[in-house]
Image (tube, rainbow, N blue to C red):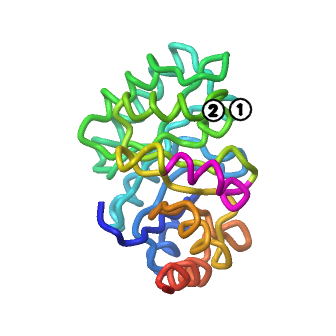
Amino acid sequence: MDDELRLEVCCGDLQSVRAAIEGGAQRVELCEALDVDGLTPSEEMMEQAIGMGIPVQVLIRPREGNFVYGKEEVARMKHGVRRAKRLGANGVVIGALRSDGDIDEEAVGLLVEEAEGLSITFHRAFDVCARPMEALEQIIALGCHRLLTSGQAPSAEQGIPLIKKLVEQAAGRLIIMPGAGVNAGNARRILRETGANEIHGSLRRDGHTDAEIVRAVVRSLQQP
């Protein structure tokens, strides 16, 4: 990709998608139930958001809790990927781990295969995986295009040291996108100190994405 700094906004409802667009975000991640860190949105929600004209990455997550999924749950996730593709999503956001904390290569491989032709982000399941540098290589080998991570820290700002290492190790083979606790006061610093050029945040006020907060982050990214 080019050197333009890109902002992706995590949106848990259609009001938030509208605010992200108004504030100048380049892309949204669409989900429901942000109070449990996001679940797969309904078909109606996908269709309406995709119709708003901004690239939409659809979160594929069948339930709250851990990221260790059984075969029936993986089948549900594959169905979610198919639905997102059929409705015209730009991409999907996926992730699965084994009980030992490593990447579930079989499950992720099935989802990546289903998502062929879409932009594929591996989500923050990465932040609880046991061996991050090995996991990065697995995620690249599986065919994901982007990794959303806080650097295994409570916030991306705190995770700057690991995110920087991930950017260096990825060496352009996939996009490392910092996320968690991003705001107008730290977004530019996170990108400058990690070497990343995409960033992710929910940028909410009173439970919804706020256009003024989005606009403030966009302005901060335009600073030299």
> Which sits in the foreground, 170 or 146?
170
Label of residue 6 in the image: none
Residue 94: x percent and y percent?
A: 48, 37
Relative to 63, say whether 163 is above or below: below
Callout 2 environment at 10 Å: few (<14), some (14 to 19), or many (20+)? some
Amino acid on which disc 2 is placed? Arg
- Image coordinates for residue 195, horizontal then vertical, percent: 49, 62
Callout 2 touching callout 1 (CB < 8 Å): yes
On screen, residue 158 versus residue 134, left or right, reads right
Of residues 221 and 113, which is closer to you in this image?
A: 221
Vertical comparison of 189 with 60: above or below: below
Instruction: Determine the residue positioned at 64% across, 30% down.
Output: 129
**Residue 112 image point, x, y percent:** 35, 30
Which of the two residues, 209 or 169, is positioned nearer the viewer here? 169
User: What residue is at 58 percent from the left and 24 percent from the top?
Assistant: 97
Q: What element carries label 1?
A: loop
Q: Is the magenta stretch mostly helix, strand or loop?
A: helix
Q: Which of marks 2 and 1 is in front?
A: 1
Is residue 184 shown above or below 160? Answer: below
Residue 166 falls inside the magenta stretch: yes
Callout 1 amino acid: Gly
Magenta highlight range = 155-167
User: Which quadrant does the N terminus fall into?
Assistant: bottom left
For disc 2, the marked residue is: 63
Label 1 Cα neighbours within 10 Å, binned few <14 / some 14-19 / many ≥20: few
Query: What residue is disc 1 on?
Result: 65
Instruction: Point out residue 25 in the picture as x, y percentages from the top left corner.
Output: 45, 72
The residue positioned 50% from the left and 78% from the top of the image is 221
Q: With 11 as the anchor, is 175 left or right in this view?
A: left
18 left or right of 154? Answer: left
Q: Nearer the viewer, residue 11 or 66?
A: 66
- Residue under the image location 55 percent in, 36 percent down: 61
